[in-house]
Structure formats: C-alpha cells, structure tokens
Image: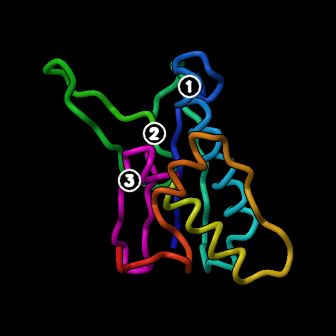
Amino acid sequence: MRIELRVCQHCLDGDHAGHYKTSVLQDMVNCAERIEEYKEVLDLDEVHIRKVRDDEPGKPEALPVVAATIQNDQIVLNDTQLVAQGQDGTMLLYAHPDDILTVLAGNVDEISKAVHEDVTVDLSEPGAKIVSEANLGANRNRGE
C-alpha cells in the first residue's frame, strides 16, 4: 500500500490561509511524517509528502490522482488531498481536510497500538477538535 499527502506549501507557511487552515495542514504533515517514520508497522510500501508551490506544476509525486472542484464555473485543482493506493491498485482519494486529518490521525493511532514508544503527534487546537469529533479509538460509544 502507498499513500501520498499533497498540500500547498504557501498555505502551510501561512501565506495563503488563515491560522485555522495552516494549523490543520501542519497537523496533517506532522501525522504523515510520523506515519512515514513507522510505515513498516502499517505495512506501507511508500509514504510521500508533496508540498506544492505556486511556481511549479502541482502534479502528484507518486500517485497519479488529482482532485478538482468547480468554483465560479472554473475547474480548480485541490491543493490539499490524500491518496491511498491498495495492493490491488484501488485508489482512495480524500479531498476534505477534516477527512484527511482523521485518516492520518487514525493511522498514527494504529501505530501507537503496535509499538512500545510514544508516537503521539501534538495536534493544534483545531486539529484536536476535528479528530476528537471523529470518535477514533476504542472508547467510542456506539449506542449514542
């Protein structure tokens, strides 16, 4: 299995986005870097983190998938996406930042269950709220 996180470097630096988006993007990258560090635990072949700048083509690094939306009757390529490719070649695309962070945090959670050292990623306040509302982990009360 392979995954690729693609983010806008300018938004990550806070140049194009407000504090909320920048914080969530930084959380995504931090989670992806932790996953890359422990990829063998999750049986991942490759983890790519692509930081795209305005002055370069925004093509993916490894997985040839690009998400797009329509804004004001124009096709706009998403500057943030997570693509996961399974062993059978099936690709999953996550384009919504909340979904991306939830998936990445879920993977970090899986790593924490398999290793003895602390692999916790300190999330920003907005990132922590997104993940807490996703109800990850074993304490989820399904009866609610």
User: Image quadrant of residue 39?
Assistant: bottom right
Residue 87 location in percent, x, y? 44, 79
Q: Position of residue 63 (x, y in %)?
A: 45, 55
How far apart marks 3 and 1 lie (CA) works out to 18 Å
Gap between marks 2 and 1 measured at Cα: 10 Å
Q: Secondary structure at mark 2?
A: loop
- The mark that comes first in sequence, 2 or 1, is 1
Q: Which residue is mark 1?
A: 11
Q: Amino acid at mark 3?
A: Tyr
Q: Answer few, some or many: residues within 10 Å of disc 1's Cα (few below 14, many 20 plus, some between 14 and 19).
A: many
Q: Nearer the viewer, residue 136 or 82?
A: 136
Tag 2 or tag 3, which sits nearer the N-term?
Answer: 2
Viewer-proximal residue among 61 and 70: 70
Foreground pick, 87 / 19: 19
Residue occupying the far right of the picture? 117
Q: Of helix, strand and loop, which one carries label 3?
A: strand
Residue at mark 2: 80
Name which residue lies at 28% across and 37% down. Answer: 68
From the image, which quarter does the C terminus lie in? bottom left
Q: Amino acid at mark 1?
A: Cys
Q: Which mark is residue 94?
A: 3
Residue shown at 56% from the left, 25% from the top: 11
Q: Residue at x 66, y 41 (%)?
A: 124
Taking 66 as reference, is 143 above or below it?
below
> For residue 82: magenta?
yes
Residue 140, image x, y percentages: 48, 75
The magenta stretch is 81-101
Q: Measure how far apart labels 3 and 2 are at the Cα level.
A: 9 Å
* Type of amino acid under label 2: Thr
